[in-house]
Image (cartoon, rainbow, N blue to C red):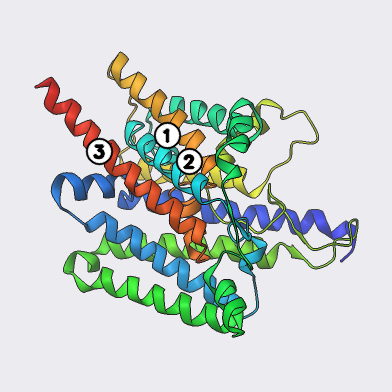
Amino acid sequence: MQESELPGLTAAVLWAAFALSVAFGALVQRTHFCTMGAVADIVNLGDWTRMRMWVLAIAVAMLGFNGMVAAGWIEAADSIYADPALLWLSNIVGGVLFGVGMVLASGCGSKTLVRLGGGNLKSLVVLLVLAVAAYATMRGVVAVARVATLDRVSLALPAGQDLPSLLAHATGASRRGLALWLGGGLGLLLMAWVLWRPEGRAGDVLLAGLGLGAVIVGVWWVSGRLGFVPEHPLTLEESFLGTSSRRMESLSFVAPVAYTMDWLILFSDASRVLTLGIVATLGAVLGSAGVALLSGSFRWEGFAGVEDTANHIVGAVLMGVGGVTAMGCTVGQGLSGVSTLALGSMLALGGIVAGGVVGVKYQAWRVERSL
């Protein structure tokens, strides 16, 4: 590839990711897809409908990602999720912090973007605080503490932490074949669990699960296939164009929110360029706003009072710190990461769910106490 071709290919990656993120925001707004809401529905009402949406999206993402691995199009090792160093304590603690935070802030990072698109001004405050907390955890004072404590506790694996790589190393079997069987088997089992009950076959469940899972797969293809350059003309190394990590990426909404704020503040700095995460953040808001305006559901909404403001700010801080520490959010780890079958992503997802349960029970306790 010639150097002159790089800007055009990078633009194609960014436009494709933007279009997919618009679809993501539109689908979440249309179907009321919400991880925090799914956890709250189970704890408070015993209703698993929205959880089935999430599990179906995981199943589709898992099937699509590992199908592409089996076809030789992409490799889990090219993502941030499959490194041999398993930061298990960071994944768990960060996940729990994020889970508690998303309850206090009335939704995770992706839901906050979607709520902003629907006219919720509380979400704007949450996003700004989340961005500052996330940036501090990536590069600031919180980052120093994170690296010196949680990140020091790790497990060195003999291969990448995705299950196909680990089993291939242990058995000598083909990694691509294992990706096909493991990803396909687990994905189909999860899909069967969703569809087993009538609520799992409801229109919104199918639309959200199939649609959002397909979006995750689409972004993996865009960054890992369309944007992949086997030999960059300047560095002579493999390169993934348009990503902040310079590795293959799919959707995530914690660090990208921080990068978006950084890009907006330092726009005149030529070193600040658009990346997949930034355009995805903007696209999710736009997609949500489009559906909200067309459906007549767009409403301006502000804080109810001081306590409401405080809860959302604390939740935003916890999401920013926890999301970076866990290396992802309900979408970044719960959909994109888990689709790679990475152990760290599964631990982070478990932490997020556990934190969400704690947060919901805490909110219920506060309500009961005020009566």
Q: Which residue is mark 2?
A: 285
Image point 44% across, 32% down: which residue?
Answer: 318
Image point 53% across, 49% down: which residue?
Answer: 252
Q: Which residue is mark 1?
A: 116
Q: Quadrant of residue 133?
A: top right
Q: CA distance from mark 3 to mark 1?
A: 22 Å
Residue 157: numbered disc:
none
Earlier along the polypeptide chain: callout 2 or callout 3?
2
For residue 336, say whether it is visible: no
Give the left or right position of residue 32, taking residue 222 as reference: left
Give the left or right position of residue 152, taking residue 206 as reference: right
Amino acid at the residue labelled 2: Val
Q: Residues within 10 Å of mark 2 (few under 14, many from 20)?
A: many
- Quadrant assignment for the N terminus: bottom right
Amino acid at the residue labelled 3: Val
Q: Position of residue 259 (x, y in %)?
A: 63, 37
Label 3 sits on a secondary structure element that is helix
Which of pointers 2 and 3 indicates the residue nearer the eye? 3
Q: Quadrant of residue 205?
A: bottom left
Q: Residues within 10 Å of mark 3 (few under 14, many from 20)?
A: many
Circles 1 and 2 in contact, beta carbons < 8 Å: yes
Q: Position of residue 211 (x, y in %)?
A: 41, 63
Image point 71% across, 27% down: which residue?
Answer: 266
Label 2 sits on a secondary structure element that is helix
Image point 25% across, 72% down: which residue?
Answer: 195
Q: CA distance from mark 1 to mark 2?
A: 7 Å
For residue 215, say whether it is visible: yes
Q: Which residue is mark 3?
A: 360
Q: Quadrant of residue 313?
A: top left
